[in-house]
Image: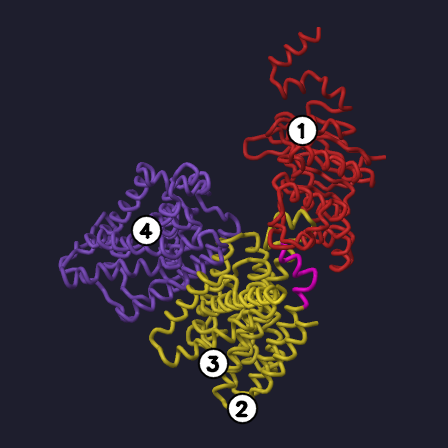
Chain colours: A red, B yellow, C purple
Amino acid sequence: MSALLSLENVSRRFGGLNALDNVTLKVEAGEILGLLGPNGAGKTTLINVVTGVHPATSGQVLLQGEDITRLKPYRIARKGLARTFQIVQPFPRMTVLENVAAGAVFAGAAPSLKEGMRLSQEHLDFTGLGHVADKPASTLTLAQRKRLELAKGLAMNPRFLMLDEVNAGLNSSEVDEALAMIRRIAERGVTILVIEHLMKVVVTISTRLAVLHHGALIAEGPPKTVLADRGVIEAYLGEKYAARLAGGAR
Amino acid sequence: MRDWLILLALALAASALPLAGDNYLMRLGTIVAMYAVLAQSWNFIGGLAGYPSFATAAFFGLGAYTSAVLLAHGAPTGFAWGAAGLMATLFAALIGGAILHLRGHYFAIASLAVGEVMREIVNTTPDLTGGGMGMNLPVPKLSIAASAQLFYFAMLGLAALTTAVAIIVQRGKLGFGLRCIQQNEDAANILGVNAYGYKTAAFCLSAVFSGIAGAIYASWVHYIEPPDVFDILLAVKPLVMVLLGGLGTVFGPIIGAALLITFEEVVWRSFLTIHAAMLGLIIVLLVLFMPNGLLALVRSWLERRRKEGKA
Amino acid sequence: MIYLQVLANGLVLGGLYAAIAVGFSLVWGVLNVINLLHGSFIVLGSYVAFFGYAYFGIHPFISAAIAGLLLFALGYAVQAGLVNRVIAAPVLITLTLTFGLDLILNNAMLLVFSADYRKVNLASPLGSLELGPIFLPGDRVAAMVLAFLLTALLYRLLRDSRIGRAIIAVRMDREAAALMGVNVSRINAITFGLGACMAGAAGALLSIIYPISPLNSSLFLGKAFVVCVLGGLGSVPGAMVGGVALGLIESFGAYWFGPEHAVTLSFGLLLVLLFVRPSGILGKRGYE
């Protein structure tokens, strides 16, 4: 039984910079994996590698055992790997409904444009955007745009959904709503990867955590274990603080 | 449905033009139909996909020369016209593979260079194409009036066909995907749009009908030379027409073609020496004051009327 | 040694091409506008030199300064009054706008100056330079040297002056520059003006070499395109490298394949380069 997605010794270089350094990571079907790491740790790069936007310079990405390392982004999308963007990327002059329908028609299961629109309306209702379906996407508020990203991802009928900072810039009640929505998506059987640099958010929702630092995977496991990890604390808070914390605990 | 009815009405109305029995009008009608084809063709790649192509002249000229060479070797007219379309399409697929990964200005320049290279290739192959001397085509053995009608209906039919394809494309998955690409290509890719494939399809669609139009044009005027059929204005005017009528709309290109040609004709007759400047002035005014085209203007006016009516 | 002669011809040509292209490159790089007026600006500069010499006996090398100033004013006005209004619009819009403006300007020049080819015939030409086996016309070399000097001057201006730094700031990040108090529309207009100024000065220098006619504008524009793509966009050294590269290519191409293939060669090369290396020989960098 192979994992849903596995990265094997994946590296990605940009010029002299090792944005991802020999990362090996498995994602099991049905879990919510939280991917943590300070800014610039390589979290978004990892998503870009998986989705084929910036293919790995070395190593392999396997989807249920199938090598997808060098596939074009649109092919990977059609295999049921969906993502949202940290900086939201709507089609500004299309309606909200059309935005979502694009996901349903090109990557999802919709056999026709009409059917795609119908399915998309359901996804919009699910994400609480049903009432703005006919508005141009450019008129949405930031919180709504983040949800639109989510709806687009869902419309792709994904097996695996990667959420890149869907909570950034939201206030606390909006964050709570978003988290509830992510749980409901997971209940539908979608495997989820959540990227956040805010620990609190990830910890409440993830079933497992992985931590990147300077492109390398430094810890992986159940939330409690990972958060107690000395290396992780150092990465986040710096060595001195970690030492003090350890001293204080003693 | 509405689009199909409008197309039918337009085609029927245009078919009545020969009843006027005026050769000058027939000539004008043929030119309008020809530019409607070119504008409609450009709209696939420029309007829908948002790639500022200047390759229209290359497709037109290639079609004209392909057909002319075939006709000179005794091929039947219909075959030569079809082959011209095919040739332009193959050429677009080939060139598109090379330049469609470029964006913005780089794509514009590359597509412009394609036309220049084509022109120079023709210039430097006198054995096949007559080079800079141009090429004579066989003159059909028809009366002047019959020949005028033949070419008018050929261009008109092609314009109707191009528009029909435009309607189908714009309502279908291809048109939807192209609009996604135009608004955000990276996001489109991630949503599963095969951007490269779609752009190539749009580029080929913009080539096939332009190529056939070039072939019909060559037969119509029965003499072609490189500066004529590879004229940069053949690439620019369709673009201006689409801007005039409305970018990415079905009937904008036709409206734009009819308006611009009519206007040009009027200006041409009265101000021969400042003809180019007048065209320039239209372009400048258009870009500065009406960048969304006439259709958008009409639409927003209708919208306002409706709202006022409700209130 | 015929090759040395061909090489020398190419270098002289290249210096002039660099001057033709550098203003075009500046506008493209900083404003993201393809200025299709550029070719006509060059021709206008040539006419300034022609009439300056014909009526007032001003040497074209001196007229270069006058043409530069006049065209700076024209360029500034065009950008401030027209192009700035659509500067944020998609590529297609600005490109179409400058095309329309060029139709107007070119048509106006045809009306005023006619399409006849004119030539500046210097009363006292500099004679020819003989460097061993190489013969070079002195005026051509002088024009090239001046062209290089002008380009170097622009380079220093961009690097060392306040306005130059502001232009580079706008090129790198328009919003950030605006936040730091740079008047972006004014910098846009100055940049466009500088581009036109370079075109005008180059046109004046070219007046002693090329026949002058409005019909030549597209020829110059085509050269500017190729040089930019060859050298990489928006950098003075890039334009230099691209200009010299094109000069050498045309010179050797004409020698090997015959002069009638020069245009095909340069455009064919442009296509190949766009395909394999869209950022040019020097690659894309900040405007330096």
Q: Which residue of the protein is positioned furthest toward the right in this rendering?
A: A1
Please identify the quarter of the rendering in which residue A241 is found: top right
Report crowding for label 2: few under 14, some 14 to 19, many 20 or more residues within 10 A (C-alpha). Answer: few
Residue at 79%, 29% (x, y): give it: A207
Q: Which residue is mark 2?
A: B20
Q: Which mark is residue C193?
A: 4
Inter-mark Cα distance, 1 to 3: 66 Å
Q: Secondary structure at mark 2?
A: helix
Above-or-below relation of C174 to B85: above
Q: Which residue is mark 3?
A: B223
Q: Secondary structure at mark 3?
A: strand
Q: Which mark is residue B146?
A: none
- Residues tagged by mark 2 and mark 1 found on one chain of the structure: no
Q: Nearer the viewer, residue B306 or C177?
A: B306
Give the amino acid at mark 3: Tyr
Report crowding for label 3: few under 14, some 14 to 19, many 20 or more residues within 10 A (C-alpha). Answer: some
Inter-mark Cα distance, 4 to 3: 44 Å
Q: How many marks?
A: 4
Give the amino acid at mark 4: Gly
Please identify the quarter of the rendering in which residue C169 is found: top left
Q: Nearer the viewer, residue B118 or C104?
A: C104
Residue C7 visible in the shown view: no
Q: Which mark is residue A22?
A: 1
The chain identifier of the residue carrying mark 2 reads B
Give the amino acid at mark 1: Asn
Residue at 35%, 59% (x, y): give it: C39
